[in-house]
Amino acid sequence: MEVIRDQHRNLSMLTDFYELTMSNGFLENHMQNKVGVFDMFFRKIPDGGGFAIFAGLQQLVDYLSELKFTQQDIDYLRTKGLFCEEFLQYLLDFDFACDVWAAKEGTPIFPGEPVVIVRGPIIQAQLVETMVLLTINHQSLLATKANRVVRAADGRSVMEFGSRRAQSYDGAILGARAAYIGGCDATACAIADRDYQIPAVGTMAHSWVQMFDSEYEAFKKYAEIYPDSCTLLVDTYNVLKSGIPNAIKVFNEVIVPQGHRPKGIRIDSGDIAYLSKKARKMLDAAGFADVGIVASNSLDEYIIRDLLTQGAKINSFGVGENLITSKSDPVFGGVYKLVALQEGDTYIPKIKISETVEKITNPGFKMVYRLYDCDTHQPIADYVTCHDEQINVRDGITIFDPNATWKKKHLTGVYAEPILHQVFRGGKSLHQPLPLKEIQAYCLQQVDNLWDEVKRFEYPHRYYVDLSPKLWQIKHDLLEEVSKF
Amino acid sequence: MEVIRDQHRNLSMLTDFYELTMSNGFLENHMQNKVGVFDMFFRKIPDGGGFAIFAGLQQLVDYLSELKFTQQDIDYLRTKGLFCEEFLQYLLDFDFACDVWAAKEGTPIFPGEPVVIVRGPIIQAQLVETMVLLTINHQSLLATKANRVVRAADGRSVMEFGSRRAQSYDGAILGARAAYIGGCDATACAIADRDYQIPAVGTMAHSWVQMFDSEYEAFKKYAEIYPDSCTLLVDTYNVLKSGIPNAIKVFNEVIVPQGHRPKGIRIDSGDIAYLSKKARKMLDAAGFADVGIVASNSLDEYIIRDLLTQGAKINSFGVGENLITSKSDPVFGGVYKLVALQEGDTYIPKIKISETVEKITNPGFKMVYRLYDCDTHQPIADYVTCHDEQINVRDGITIFDPNATWKKKHLTGVYAEPILHQVFRGGKSLHQPLPLKEIQAYCLQQVDNLWDEVKRFEYPHRYYVDLSPKLWQIKHDLLEEVSKF
């Protein structure tokens, strides 16, 4: 089970300032009890991939469960001269009262569908926007990237090695968490092991080798201390002429006589494809066919795929900066939009117009279902409905492209499962924390289940995210109304 | 003065695991009192720029000053079955004893020169590697990016608006800090204001406008509450047909009668160049020539430069994801390398070889000077020497390209100033915290002082970072020695 880190860390002021001016404004306008519904969704999958992985929910739940404003916060806010005392008192007495629905961590998610829904007094639902986005955007970005790297490694181990190049402390720590959800099986980051039980690994840097009079001596001293977990870094001087011969010598002189087997060698520079093939032959010839080769030099999913295509002999990959920052596409663009306001017993749908068609929001208080093939259990489409809409797939269901309604498809032999689950009711958490290992297993199983066409790295098949006719009609009517301007 | 955030946050396990296995190894080999020197330096300026900005030192000093290992850390480490009890006790009794030199925050820095030097017992100097790199890499990346954006804005205000897309919590908070050093003059992030006194700004999101029955009513209600700081977001429906006419109406009906002046309008979508010019005319015609226009739609230094080239009428820019993640180049590749080991009274230089010439390290315990033109006070070159080397520029100084020694230049009329300053002596901090505003002013003045050729965004002039003849000879001799392999 995860330890909740930094319980005393007060992040309630980690919010865009306008959330505060707006919330104060709602109160001054006596709208604080008005109930609204906000959707978090995203529009574009990082790296042009076919799906993203939802992650960060545990940290969001922790944050919302513990959300309090301290006297220090209030004193700070008062200095701004913008907030009424009633609002400051409201914050001091803050008692989270919203309902929240969210996808399970590790779930593949797609553009245009809500992945978090917050319903509650607008004064509160507005106030949590920044942290909802910051938390989910970051971890979903990293889980998505890690999963790409893991898929490229095609069954080989991928270790997250990026702490030193992460975008600050939580970028490293929660980045390691998200990378593990996406399928990495270890990290170099010790705190991620201490707090999230992600196995931390690591043996030596070049500095260890430089610290001794010779590479041989450096290897020997290391092997003597760590005989049963000995991975030697072989590229400080020359991989083939010096590093591997010295490693083999030390394996034979130190490790084998003690009844242990060496664990591996690591190559961190040079042409990994060429060097790993040569290294494999040298190790095999010396009787170390069971000793692994770790590669770790500016890797990402594309380089890993190319290395494997070229027959590189690598057992595990240490992936650093390109993973921990999602370097090739370092932003997950989740947004948080008002979609409905409660009036009596009903929800008045709200829409945000844009000149760019893809930027027009889907209005209304919604629910999302995933439609699966009854035979293969593979997901076929996501189906977005009004929140209380009953869907019946027994006689099949017709889905259509919401931007090109003549593109229709009648599906039979399908079943539907909700992908959003309620995690807060009236501000009280319903969320059951899961061991990270279980979240990872769920993620890998869900990804495994996707069509191969959706999993292509480049130009994947666009997975269907369609609206129910009822929801589509609401959107259509609102657009017609607005266009009367 | 900055508040030290999260004093109770224990980040001592935020380290690559191999720092721990190596440090334990040094102790088991009775090398813990051996003194070594490590350099932090970087090889490549983000975005192909001509210089980077050094930032993050205050957080590094805070970390090193407070570095302790808790019983929780020790208990965790013991479970790994790798560390001897003597090492665990060493950590429990940890007492930082290193000397540290570093550049001042806000200093322009260049590839190949040390920007942090750590000298001390290798068991400690090795252990702090990950946090030195993580802290300095992140903030230097963000300060460098922010400074590019600020220079593109050519005197206009730049506000950091990226929290929701940052790479986790510290990415947002310390990112805002670094962006301020680089020249941003405000942030949307309230906690950066509370803890670092960076002015937080922000008024309304589209949701505010959607919350009311009409845009006019939304503006009116806002203006009534915030008459003296009223910036209205005018693009929820239609900027020119609805947003600006409604804003002008509300300015006239609510703000002006109260004796206030409106602050601005904000445009967050559409073609900013076109819309801002139209908006400017409409505001001017209505008697609001003093009202500013804020633009905030996926901006970066290139888009800002283009907008201004096209005559966009913008008074301030809100820059989000492209700044807070340094999206176009999200990694600052600082490295930390062993460069010398103490033997008696002398330092034995150490070198790390690589097949890539640029990756070969500069050996030895060093110092860095900046050479300035006596007339213009502009920096001409950085000059890396042995740590105790006396430099004499009275009769001029000859510098040469360390990779092409026939490229020589004799400089006269120059003076030299060290850019590294000692911040720890025997583990005790000598660092005087500075108000962030002073660091920003220093940074902007230093950048202002650089040659325009170095400040070009694309293909800038490469600033000279040269070695003293003595240092060059040490490197040359070591390379000759190693190449005998």
Image (spheres, coloured by chain):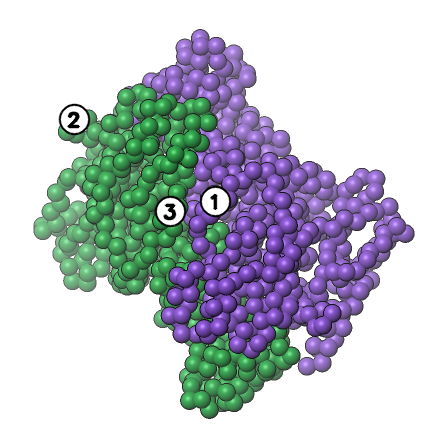
Chain colours: A purple, B green
In the image, residue B412 lies at what x, y percent? 14, 54
- Give me the disc on residue B8: 3
Up the image or down, A160 lies above or below A282; here it is below
Mark 3 crowd level (few <14, some 14–19, many ≥20, 10 Å Cα) = few
Residue at numbered disc 2: B344
Rendered residue at 80%/65% (across/down): A470
Q: Residue furthest right?
A: A395
Mark 1 crowd level (few <14, some 14–19, many ≥20, 10 Å Cα) = few
Up the image or down, A357 lies above or below A268; here it is below
Tell me the CA gap for discs 2 and 3. Answer: 39 Å
Task: Say which quadrant the C terminus of chain A sits in.
Answer: bottom right
Q: Left or right of A265: which side holds A50?
A: right
- Can residue B395 be seen here? yes
In the image, residue B44 lies at what x, y percent? 38, 46
In the image, residue A80 lies at what x, y percent? 40, 71
In the image, residue B435 lies at what x, y percent? 28, 60
* Amino acid type, residue under disc 1 in the picture: Arg
Task: Say which quadrant the N terminus of chain A sits in.
Answer: top right
Rendered residue at 26%/31% (across/down): B121
N-term-proximal mark, 2 vs 3: 3
* Amino acid type, residue under disc 2 in the picture: Gly
Tell me the CA gap for discs 2 and 1. Answer: 45 Å
Q: Left or right of B343: which side holds A408?
A: right
Q: Left or right of A121: which side holds A14?
A: left
Name the one closer to the observer, B234 or A5: A5
- Give me the disc on residue A5: 1
**Secondary structure found at label 1:** loop
Q: Residue furthest left?
A: B395
Rendered residue at 33%/53% (across/down): B4
Name the one closer to the observer, B114 or B312: B114
Using the image, name the chain to which the residue with label 3 belongs.
Answer: B
Up the image or down, B15 lies above or below A61; here it is above
